Amino acid sequence: MIKIKDLTKVYGEKKIYNKFSMEIKEECITALLAESGGGKTTLLRIVAGLENYQEGTIEGLLGKKIAFVFQEDRLLPWLTVEQNIAFVLKGCLTEDEIAYKTEDWLKKLQLEEAKHEYPKSLSGGMRRRVALARAFCYPYDLLLLDEPFKGLQRQLKKDILTHLLEQQKKNPKTILWSAHDEEEVKGYVQEIKRIKKGTL
């Protein structure tokens, strides 16, 4: 269990969280729902260790490998699609394992024909898929998804989620997925956590 207790986060004079608490179950997919500007991204960044906070505690993260799909693609422009995906696996797997896993996710996310392309030549949707493939193939303990499917067609999103669920079934991990509404995550998550006005 990841336990967030009495979290307070302040930007300047703006209080983003005020004594906010939440528990996140291990080895399941949890949706984090809130309106735009509701603090979803900030919470994910805090959990990832990318944002400081003023008060409170977070338990259950020690030693966890974290993968993060940001709202921005954050690809390395000097690397090809294939190299961007393989980059996160260096030091984690053998060369043969890296090659196999990279090829596997290129195929699953329909990126095989673009494997030698550079990010600048890709469409927005293709860059998004590379960012997803890079995170999905990493041997994470915790996967953070910040509105990860923006700009993707409905069927493609469904196909990608099918692959993620297959991986989750074989090897359950903790996944926290921020989204705007329940319809987007329905049928894919085991838990739903809502950040409501009044907790901020």
Image (cartoon, helix red, strand yellow):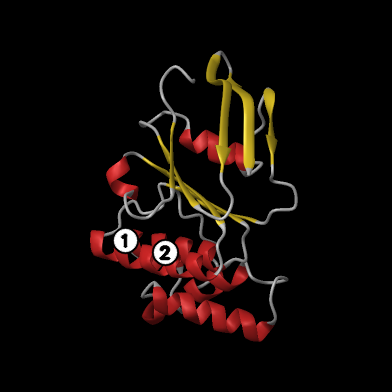
Question: Residue at left 31%, top 42%?
Answer: 182
Please provide percent x and percent y for residue 113.
Answer: 37, 81
Q: Is residue 77 visible?
A: no
Please say if 63 is above or below 169: above
Q: Say left or right for 26 vs 145.
A: right
Please say if 132 is above or below 109: above
Which disc number belongs to residue 157? 1
- Which tag is nearer the camera, tag 1 or tag 2? 1
Q: Is residue 153 visible?
A: yes
Amino acid carrying mark 1 in the image: Lys
Please provide percent x and percent y for residue 178.
Answer: 43, 43
Q: Which residue is mark 2?
A: 120
- Image quadrant where one finds the N terminus: top right
Amino acid carrying mark 2 in the image: Lys
Sequence-wise first label, 1 or 2: 2
Mark 1 surroundings within 10 Å by alpha-carbon count, few (fewer than 14), some (14 through 19), many (20 or more):
some
Q: Say left or right for 55 vs 111.
A: right
- In which image quadrant can residue 43 be found? top right
Measure the alpha-carbon separation of dots 1 and 2.
22 Å
Question: Residue at left 48%, top 80%?
Answer: 104
Furthest-bottom residue in view?
Answer: 96
**Circle 1: element type:** helix
Please provide percent x and percent y for residue 135.
Answer: 53, 62
